[in-house]
């Protein structure tokens, strides 16, 4: 059951969620509440399938937040979620741990890194990629002014990794969500 998708799907127009029945403040409260309760990127079924396919059998999710992604994927693969500050209400047993420690300690070389919306104004995204010893990254984030992670993190992905697949999920209005898959160059 994909409760997030069920909650937002009535409002999808051409791949974008919009709500003309809400004023700007109500819209922001609703959208931010959904992102906090579930995940920043909308988990429409095609997107979940894309992420599942590209993660493979084993993955670590070191910025797991509410553990929503883990809860959707756990029936088909081994995935471990961690977060420096997991919320009280969560969907899976997210361990409390810094992302660098999470990828340093737990990873066999076959384990993929699910890099989902690392913080924008913090170098933890780039440090996590540097510490990761595996060969595959599935990066869920956004392009442009609403993006996740630092510019340096994107530079590392562009220069030291090879992009092998990409997917555009159903998007929140005004946010250019995208999912890119990388293999070590
Ligand atoms: C923008 S949220 C994204 C959460 C989730 N991945 C999603 O897609 O909804 C960023 C998350 O990174 C976590 N975080 C920030 N710094 C961290 C660190 N050093 N190690 C692990 N998690 C961290 C925050 O607690 C927060 O849950």
Image (cartoon, rainbow, N blue to C red):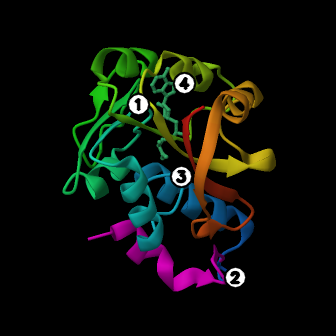
Alpha-carbon neighbours of circle 2 within 10 Å: few (<14), some, or many (≥20)? few
Asked whether disc 1 touches disc 2, contact meaning CB atoms under 8 Å apart, the reply is: no
State the mark number for residue 40.
Answer: 3
C-alpha span from label 1 to label 4: 11 Å
Q: Mark 3 or mark 2: name the one nearer the start of the chain.
A: 2
Look at discs 1 and 4 and give the one toward the viewer.
4
Asked whether disc 1 touches disc 4, contact meaning CB atoms under 8 Å apart, the reply is: no
Q: Mark 3 or mark 4: name the one nearer the start of the chain.
A: 3
Residue at which label 4 appears: 129
Q: Mark 2 or mark 4: name the one nearer the start of the chain.
A: 2
| 33 is higher (above) or lower (below) than 97 | below
Please identify the quarter of the rendering in which residue 159 is found: top right
C-alpha span from label 1 to label 2: 36 Å
Residue at which label 1 appears: 62
| 74 is higher (above) or lower (below) than 121 | below
Asked whether disc 2 touches disc 4, contact meaning CB atoms under 8 Å apart, the reply is: no
Alpha-carbon neighbours of circle 1 within 10 Å: few (<14), some, or many (≥20)? many
Could you say whether the residue bearing mark 3 is in a helix, strand or loop?
loop
Q: Is mark 1 within 8 Å of ligand 1?
A: yes
C-alpha span from label 3 to label 2: 21 Å
Residue at which label 2 appears: 20
Please identify the quarter of the rendering in which residue 133 is found: top left
Q: Residue 103 in the image: x percent, y percent?
A: 39, 22
Relative side of 81 to 84, left or right: left
Relative side of 45 to 182, left or right: left
C-alpha span from label 3 to label 4: 20 Å
Residues in magenta, as a range: 1-18
Residue 72 vs residue 179, the one in the foreground: 179
């Amino acid at each position: 059951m994909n409760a997030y998708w069920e909650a937002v799907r009535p409002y999808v127009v051409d791949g974008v969620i919009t709500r003309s029945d809400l004023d700007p403040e109500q819209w922001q409260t609703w959208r931010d509440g959904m992102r906090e309760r579930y995940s920043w990127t909308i988990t429409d079924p095609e997107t979940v399938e894309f992420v599942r396919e590209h993660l493979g059998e084993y993955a670590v999710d070191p910025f797991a937040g509410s553990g929503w992604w883990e809860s959707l994927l756990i029936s088909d693969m081994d995935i471990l979620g961690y977060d420096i500050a997991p919320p009280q209400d969560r969907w899976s047993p997210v361990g409390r741990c810094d992302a660098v420690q999470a990828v340093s300690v737990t990873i066999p070389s076959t384990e993929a890194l699910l890099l989902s919306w690392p913080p924008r104004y913090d170098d933890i995204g780039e440090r996590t990629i540097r510490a990761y010893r595996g060969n595959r990254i599935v990066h869920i984030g956004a392009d442009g002014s609403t993006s996740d992670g630092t510019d340096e993190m994107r530079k590392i992905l562009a220069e030291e990794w090879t992009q092998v697949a990409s997917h555009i999920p159903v998007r929140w209005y005004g946010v250019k969500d995208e999912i890119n898959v990388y293999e070590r160059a």
